[in-house]
Amino acid sequence: MKELYELIQCVWCIIMGKCPNCGFKGLFLKIKECLYCGRTCCERCARYVVTIGSADKWACSEECARKFEEKVLTYPLKDIGTFLDSEFYDVEDKLWHSACIDALNKNDPSRENWFNLLKQGLAMRIMHVETKSSDGKHESDLGRKFRRRALLTLAHNMETVGRPLDAAKIYEEYLKMYAKARELREKEKQVLVKKMDISVNLNELIQQVKNGGIVVVYRCPHCGGKLKISRNTSVESMKVCEHCGSEIETMKLTELLRTALS
């Protein structure tokens, strides 16, 4: 009889789980580890849930959920590139997977398994990651935030390599940052107007050389070779150095001529 009682107690303890964190007892209580800090918690005290694909991973607090999000959203995006094409989406997808896995607690068993899948180039999909509180007061679609950051990085790279109009298109069509798109387009217009003014000034300076019947000597900004401007010199011939073959910008030519004629 005593053995039967002990057996019933043992079975009951298994069925009636107890959370080691908050002490709550419940039938078939789910116990999991926090995805960020590794702390053991139950579905009652773990208010925040992170869904990765079809698997639920819990954060033991709002703080851990926020830290997880922050780590994903600060993952390096140096490989994003400068073109919005199929390669961009492939790279962004790979970085997305890597960021989500990297943000998990170091002792999470699935972390190492998923990293191995990525290294082997096997198909893997973390399609949707969201943090959601049990009371419904907090909800965040991390995937959309990551895609937006990737597009912001792409637009910034386009600006860096001198393609402001392409960057403006990203800001307008994908990020809805209309003021930024307008700012870039207005700057590009100013540059075009300035280049036109410089071209006009260059023609006037060459005409001064021809009218004065003089010869102006200037140096190539690339190789330092001596170049001459005389009555028979054309604008097009001035734009390429006869020594090194380098292209000389119109703006630099104008500055060189002004210096030589002053």
Image (cartoon, grey):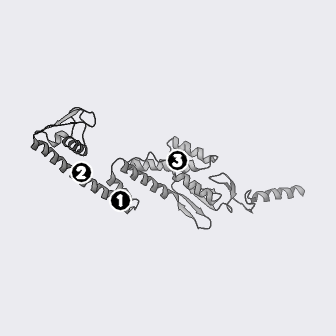
Q: Which residue is mark 1?
A: 181
Tell which of 194 and 88 is nearer to you: 194
Tell me which label, 3 or 1, sits earlier in the chain. 3
Instruction: Please give the name of the residue rendered at 36% of the width and 51% of the height, measured from the top-left corner.
Output: 159
Q: Residue furthest right?
A: 1
Q: Which residue is mark 3?
A: 98
How many numbered tags mark residues here?
3
Tell me whether circle 1 and circle 2 mark residues in contact (CB < 8 Å): no
21 to the left or right of 167: right
Please identify, in this view, whether the residue under mark 3 or under mark 1 is nearer the observer.
Answer: 1
Query: Whole-Å distance between the Cαs marked 2 and 3?
Result: 45 Å
Q: Residue furthest front?
A: 262
Q: Tell me the element at label 2.
A: helix
Q: Tell me the element at label 1.
A: helix
Q: Amino acid at mark 3?
A: Ser
Query: Whole-Å distance between the Cαs marked 1 and 2?
Result: 21 Å
247 to the left or right of 230: right
Density class for disc 2 (Cα within 10 Å; few <14, some 14-19, many ≥20) is some
Res 4 quadrant in image: bottom right
Density class for disc 1 (Cα within 10 Å; few <14, some 14-19, many ≥20) is many
Tell me whether circle 2 and circle 3 mark residues in contact (CB < 8 Å): no
Q: Amino acid at mark 1?
A: Ala
Q: Is 134 rendered above or below residue 124?
A: below
Residue 195's mark?
A: 2
Residue 258's mark?
A: none
Please identify, in this view, whether the residue under mark 1 or under mark 2 is nearer the observer.
Answer: 2
Q: Amino acid at mark 2?
A: Lys
Q: Is residue 83 visible?
A: no
Res 47 quadrant in image: bottom right
